Image: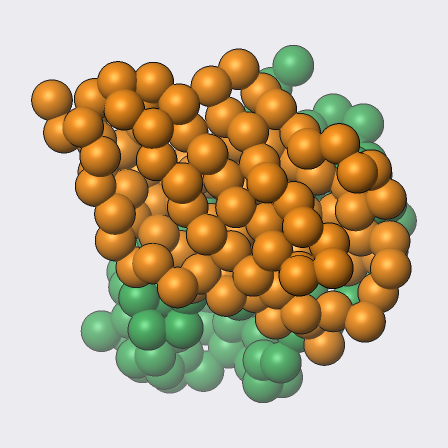
Chain colours: A orange, B green
Amino acid sequence: AQTVTQSQPEMSVQEAETVTLSCTYDTSESNYYLFWYKQPPSRQMILVIRQEAYKQQNATENRFSVNFQKAAKSFSLKISDSQLGDTAMYFCAFMNPDGSRLTFGEGTQLTVNP
Amino acid sequence: KAGVTQTPRYLIKTRGQQVTLSCSPISGHRSVSWYQQTPGQGLQFLFEYFSETQRNKGNFPGRFSGRQFSNSRSEMNVSTLELGDSALYLCASSYSGPKNIQYFGAGTRLSVL
């Protein structure tokens, strides 16, 4: 079974600064997908970024990028130029090989301060 | 394209009752997954349906069940409700397969009194 761990329950950052959220996972699979989702106060779960494990290149989506270290089973999210709208709970998630199930970490509550 | 639609958005039930939640996936998506979110346990996988068949199941008691219809819409049912079933229930749809992203609905907030 896969496990996902987010060791930072809460983080805060000043607007326009950069912040990094940590995530580690454990799996015996070799090909898999990792995700970061955000859940703002509206509770709507929104995809932030996706990483394919067989790709060495780190995924980027505008201000969001990941640092994927497959050997270390680490998958951190970097948010550049933080905006007030980035305030949300961020979840790291592992997708099982058949794509039917996401295993989530505990979440990191990020607050962006003006 | 319309997103994932979950109904109702809010429900209040009493212990011992049963409840049915509905999820309409994005058009063309054939996989529907259900998750329970609570402050204590976080996000936990309930089950996943693809082409009307349950393909994967989490560690929940038999009181939690689901089904999927031929139009890919899915329902989940919880019988003999307990206080601990109070949670946000999220549904996600995808084309299926690990390359495909799961898109989430806004959830159904269930309160058991």
Taking depth in this image into account, of B105 and A29 the one nearest to the observer is: A29
Residue B58: x, y in percent? 66, 74
Residue A27 falls in image quadrant = bottom right
Residue B51: x, y in percent? 88, 49
Residue A26: x, y in percent? 67, 69
In the image: residue A11, left or right of residue B91: left
- Identify the residue shown where x is 54% and y is 42%: A36
In the image: residue B81, left or right of residue A103: left
In the image: residue A101, left or right of residue B77: right
- Identify the residue shown where x is 59% and y is 40%: A67
- Identify the residue shown where x is 18% and y is 28%: A14
Image label count: 0
Quarter occupied by the C terminus of chain A: top left
Residue A59 can be seen, yes or no? yes
Taking depth in this image into account, of B78 and B36 the one nearest to the observer is: B36
In the image: residue A79, left or right of residue A32: left
